[in-house]
Amino acid sequence: MPVQPAPMDVHTNSALTTVSTAYIQRPNWLADRIFPVVPVLKQSDFYYTYNKDDWFRSVAGVRAPATESPGGGWQVSKDTYYASVYAVHKDLDDQTRANQDAQFNLDRDAVEWVTMNLMIKRDAIFVSKYLVAGVWGRDRTGVAGVPAGLQFKQWDQAGSTPIDDILAERLIIKQTTGFVPNTLVLGAQVMQTLLRHPTVIELIKYTQTGIPTEDLLAGLFRVDRVVDADTVENIAPEGGAFSASFQVGKVALLCYSAPSPGLLRPSAGYIFGWTGLLGSGAVGSTISKFRMPAIKSDRVEGEMAWDMKLVGADLGTFWSAAVA
């Protein structure tokens, strides 16, 4: 009778997890570049949110002799997160492994393939939660003609004013929240348009390089960073013809993202990574390898556990159809 549980059932392969963590840290993934990750020990829990009204109102006043000082406080409410577990595996059969040439490393390849699957899924969910209309405090819609209301002239149209548009929203977010937005997220087509926009070219032509870059755009738009959201996903089913698509469409998001998570630290969004999951890394990821005797294979399996929360909708402005 085999021992239950077997050693492989209670062990996460730390070496393979290290390989996966290095792959996760590559700079092209989207989610971690925009909102900070909050490491959490429990799969679900609550976190506190504060009423901004109470923090931008002054109740201070003149204190008369022998009287109490004016007093006040702030309201606190709760919200919850639930870190769903996402998983995928790759089986390495004995025959293929025995036949591999020296230049191959199937175990490492399997770790990277599993990790890439999970990261693509995570970025796709990030886009569906944050980079869509109807989520943020203000939605702006691009039009080719004369804009009205919250519309704006698409930034690839003659006479468009992307810098003025973004700076105006920067002031609105500052006025309504007290926080200056520090992050501008641009879909790949929008980024390409802004890098070639005549207003941008005119303003940077006397800089040291005269060539528009993300850092120069950040200076023009008065944000700490511009994120080029250029992740790509094959949307074809397995076995179908390769069909690449940008995960992020022709959109833009201006928001305040906390440099790091913390108490009394507002942020447009937070990502809760379940680091309490057995053997998990910094973003709630694990890689395990275990034997599948029935099919004479080793299984490399990856898991990631996270929840993505919109914490401050009023800390962001979203542009849809930013270019035609």
Image (spheres, rainbow, N blue to C red):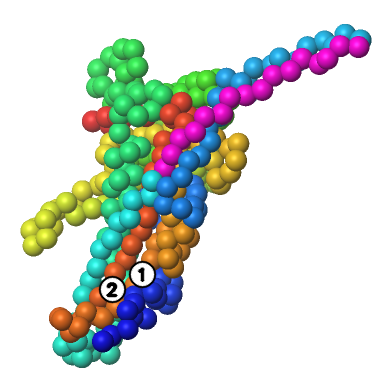
The quadrant of the image that shows the N terminus is: bottom left
Mark 1 → mark 2, Cα distance in angstroms: 7 Å
SS of the residue under disc 2: strand
Q: Earlier in the sequence, mark 1 or mark 2?
A: 1
Question: Quick check: 243 above or below 143?
Answer: below
Q: Residue 235, position in %: x, y?
A: 16, 51
Left or right relative to 41: residue 297: left
Q: Which amino acid does label 1 sit on?
A: Ile
Q: Are marks 1 and 2 in contact (CB under 8 Å)?
A: yes
- Give the quadrant of residue 227: top left
Residue occupying the point 88% across, 8% down: 64
For the point 54% across and 41% down, the residue is 258
Q: What element carries label 1?
A: strand
Q: Where is residue 240 in the image (x, y as percent from the top left)?
A: 8, 58
The answer to whether residue 211 is magenta is no
Residue 215 visible at all: yes
- Report which residue position mark 2 lands on: 300
Badge 2: few (under 14), some or many (20 or more) residues near its Cα, within 10 Å?
A: many
Between 162 and 248, the one lying in front of the other is 248
**Quarter that holds the C terminus:** top left
Helix, strand or loop for the magenta stretch, by majority = loop
Residue for point 57% across, 20% down: 53
In the displayed structure, 20 sits above or below 95; it is: above
Task: Tell me residue 81's x, y (percent).
Answer: 42, 43
Nearer to me, 93 or 192:
93
Task: Residue type at mark 2: give it.
Answer: Val
Query: Which numbered circle lies on residue 301?
Result: none
Closer to the camera, 82 or 17?
A: 82
Q: Give the range drawn in magenta.
A: 66-81
Q: Which residue lies furthest to the right in this view?
A: 65
The residue identified by callout 1 is 287
